[in-house]
Amino acid sequence: MSVPAEPARTPRIFVAITPQELGVLYSEEALERLRGVGEVVLPPETGENRVPLPEGFADDYDVLITSWSTAPFDPSVLSGSRLKYAAHTAGTVRGLFPKQVLEQGLRLAQGGSAAMATAVAELALTFTLVLLRDVHSMDRRLQATHDWRAGGSGTLTHGIREQTIGVLSLSRVGREYVSMVRGLGVREVLVHDPFATEDDAAALGVQLVGLAELCERSDVLAIHAPVTDETRGMLNADMIARLRDGAIVLNTARSAVIDMEALTAELVAGRLRAGLDVFDVEPLAENSPLYGLDNVLITPHVAGGTVEARRAQGDGVVQEISAFLSGAPLRYEVTAEIYDRLS
């Protein structure tokens, strides 16, 4: 007499995200799709800003969903009889998941970064256009003086097509930014990225160059590199000094990639221009010399934050979890081989 097969176990999915953040990242439609592939368990409402992982969590759940509001945890809590997969709805996984969890066998996805890449590239492009056309300076002067000529009437600014655009790193954001400027008709785009191949360059219509050449030839230098041991401080004082007078530096990536003290000195002197979303210390100090400079645009680390990007982050995670549970290929998996190159 044959023994009947045991029914398949319904996957259990724990969402370690506060209700407030969950509402920003996941639409009701996305949550319904998630419930269609497993039992979704939301944390109890405690009013706290962080959600801790429950005791014995890895023995009770198959999938973990995290984001900015997930409380830090010891990697050992991810070792258990059931947990096989975690999907991060925010940007980098490195602040929450150490590399050792991959060595323990957990599969991991950086599900929110692709959606954020478009938003970050959009802000970098916005900085590019505003600084080339000097929109911010004219607005400030016109608003302050109500004087047409003092506001810049008759001023000639610069178009983007004729500029040489330099891009540091063909990360997801770097590729998005290249696509955007190429779409606007920019003819010369230079890229420095040790991991990029000539096939990558040909597909994107860019030229691969060394770091020094990138700095020397770029009218606009857009930083899109993650912080790693290799990239930390790579744009040092010497490289910054190689930038031509009037060049624009954009940083919507990580402040540690560039020597901010050297860059600030050049900005205060007026030799360079910049659009900056990230800084060595955040919030930016009240006495920062970057405040009030006509040649500088600053934003408070908001590059990845659009309504559309946030919802796309949730949609991306739902798609990744559905793929994992069905055995389909994953788009945003983080492996041990690429972990150290991530933002």
Image: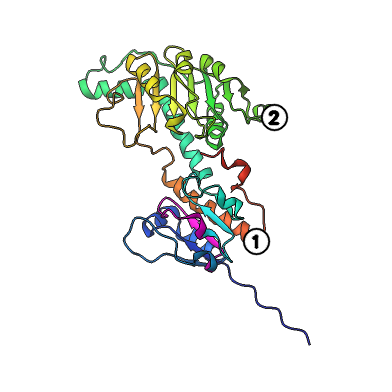
Say what secondary structure mark 1 lies in.
helix
Q: Which mark is residue 67?
A: none
> How many angstroms separate mark 2 from mark 1 (CA)?
33 Å
The residue under the point 53% across, 59% down is: 78
Would residue 128 be found to the left or right of residue 60 on screen?
left
Start-end of magenta stretch = 60-77
Q: Which residue is mark 1?
A: 326
Q: Where is the N terminus found, in terms of image quarters?
A: bottom right
Q: Position of residue 243 (x, y in %)?
A: 47, 15
Q: Which residue is mark 2?
A: 199
Q: Earlier in the sequence, mark 2 or mark 1?
A: 2
Say what secondary structure mark 2 lies in.
helix
Q: Position of residue 298 (x, y in %)?
A: 35, 30
- Neighbor class of circle 1 (other Cα within 10 Å; few <14, some 14-19, many 20+) is few
Q: Position of residue 29 (x, y in %)?
A: 49, 60
In the displayed structure, would residue 270 be above or below residue 298?
above
Residue kind at label 2, given as amino acid type: Asp
